[in-house]
Amino acid sequence: MPDGPSGAPGAGGVFGRSANETGVSILTATAPPETSEDLDLGGDSRARGADRSFRGLVTLAGLMVLVILALILVTTTLRAMPALRDEGLWGFITGTRWAPNEDIFGTFPMLYGTLVTSLIGMIVAVPVSIGIALFITEIAHRRVRKYIVTVVDLLATIPSVVFGLVGVLVVVPFITDWYQGFARLVDPIPVLSSIFDESNTGRNYFTAGLVLAIMTIPIITSIAREVFDTVPETDKQAAYALGATRWEMIRGAVLPHSFGGLVGASMLGLGRAMGETIAVALVIGGSFHISANMFDTGNTMAAVIAQQWGESTGLHTDALVGIGVVLFAITIIINFVARWVVRRAETKMRGAHS
Amino acid sequence: MTTVTQGGPPDLSGKNLSLRRAAANRAATIGIGLCVLIAAFPLILVAYQVVVRGGSAIGLDFLTEEIARNYRTAGGGMGPAIVGTLLITGMAALIAIPIGVLGAVYLNEYGKDRPLAKFIRTMADVMTGVPSIVMGLFIYVAYVLVIGERTGFGGALALACLMLPIVIRSTEEMLRLVPDELRQASAALGARKWRTTLSVVLPTASSGITSGSLLAVARAAGETAPIIVTVGLTYLYRPDLFAGQNTTLAAQIYRNATQPFEASQERAWGAALVLIAIVFLFTILSRIISARFAIDRR
């Protein structure tokens, strides 16, 4: 067993040691103090056995990923079966009434809330993230770039529960008046007035969407940056040579080249937003109806699991696990497609320019 | 015709840009810059609020005392939650990092471009997108229900599942940076592949692996959803992860933030400050270690 990297848990002393190890490892590792036994090049069966069992060990470790994913699917589906059978899969997903006391489990209001909040999140986060990525790759001076990357990285490290805490105790009380003001402002406009209607609370779809936007900005930004980095320098220089301004260069050379990758990045952000639990649970309000009003309270699939887990028993628990299964399926599909889109876009670019 | 008589290099300063194009360029630059401010604003807001509000709640008592049972009354601390966070996250790291590193060894040293390795790589990427609450439900069904009790170890398992794909992918990234010459040199000295891997490849990549793993640990330390599903709740110190319910800082923040009482909200802010401090510590450690690695790569 490797002692440096694999045995490194949260304990502080280990890090110092492994850092020292690397300092010397390149010098010593190429000429390790071998015993005469190890120098035997003839493949005796014990040495071959060691090789084979090590190979088996690492393969097993690699397979763990597949095993865990399969186990998630099987065990949670089995557990959720009673609730799913009670409603039928279709009824479970499309039913609009959630009444655990009467054993009625229709999860459509939560599905709706999940879609609406993550959509709001994406509408805000995607342009902002693309803007940040463009700033980092095309505009910022190299010295400034470092700090902006740090800001985005720090944003990614803040735990979601802290976003939720700030959201519910700071943003919600402050922003409620703004919502009411905005609702009055758009009142005369037909469609907008029903989307942004009066409400008496800041805990609503829109606040949840804003929190999700902040939480997905880091992931979308980092992938958008990778995508922009694959744009060939020659294309950019060619655009400048034709007399383009920087913005025209971005529009003509960078964005068309990156479109596929940006779609993938946005989908990854969407997957993250749909699965986000705690921050949303704190700011969404927790009601079970379907409302076109973005300033109305609601719920999402992930949030309802966290909110009701403590007081659930029996079929109710099974139904919550069932919501988890549906959520798992949705996020897996989105992630799979997104990775595929990103990879395809990347290979297409590389193929064209190498 | 006229160009010949004018002579000299063409004017590239951009002064002759049409007003419309210049304005579009300026507006786009400002818009893009604004995006950065939009991202910086929540970071500053969160940092400011947590430091100011958490700072007033925090003290030595807060860090060591047991958790108050009543939401309404002030007093009590977060001692058990701090210990719980460190123990559960540490246990998760103990499980996930060895498996993850070995899995990455398979992907980079053995599997390479084989269909199975490619498939595992894709599924590891997909696994990073599995919502943390789903991991919690999985461990609840597959472990908590089986042993019949919510324990700290259940939470550690859930966090380990979340960390595993991150560790695998970051470690593989680092192993790919190890120059092939080192592997060949080791093989030329007669070392078998397992020996080459353990005593040459992994040590060379060790600081990169450590920094990637630390980042995964930092992520896991702030997770709430899987914890409230699998770990339960306690007010007392519970250093034994295998018996009895436990608690973490993140779970305490969530629990206290949902209450309308001044005292509990105060506790939530204090816990948030401690949690952010822990997460930052891991992140900064990771940064320092990866900065050292950059020197190694030269």
Image (cartoon, rainbow, N blue to C red):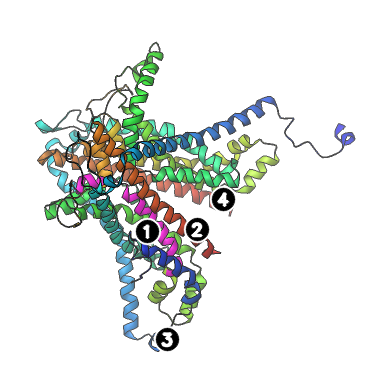
Q: Which of marks 2 and 1 is in front?
A: 2
Which chain letter goes with mark 3? Answer: A
Q: What secondary structure is marked by label 1?
A: helix
Q: What stretch is highlighted in magenta?
A: B203-231
Secondary structure, mark 3, is: helix
Crowding near the residue tagged with mark 1, few <14, some 14–19, many ≥20 C-alpha atoms within 10 Å: many
Q: Is residue B115 visible?
A: yes
Tag 1 subunit: B
In the figure, is residue B186 to the left or right of A82? Answer: right
- Give the x, y percent position of residue A167: 34, 32
- Mark 2 and mark 3: span between their CA atoms? 36 Å
Residue indicated by mark 4: A352
Give the label on residue A104, or none: none
Which badge, 2 or 1, is on the more N-terminal residue? 1
Residue B286, given in percent of the width and then of the height, sits at 43, 56
* Residue drawn 50% across the image and 40% down it: A259
Please rate how many residues cluster around mark 2, counting C-alpha atoms within 10 Å: few if below 14, some from 14 to 19, many from 20: some
The disc labelled 3 sits on which kind of residue? Answer: Leu
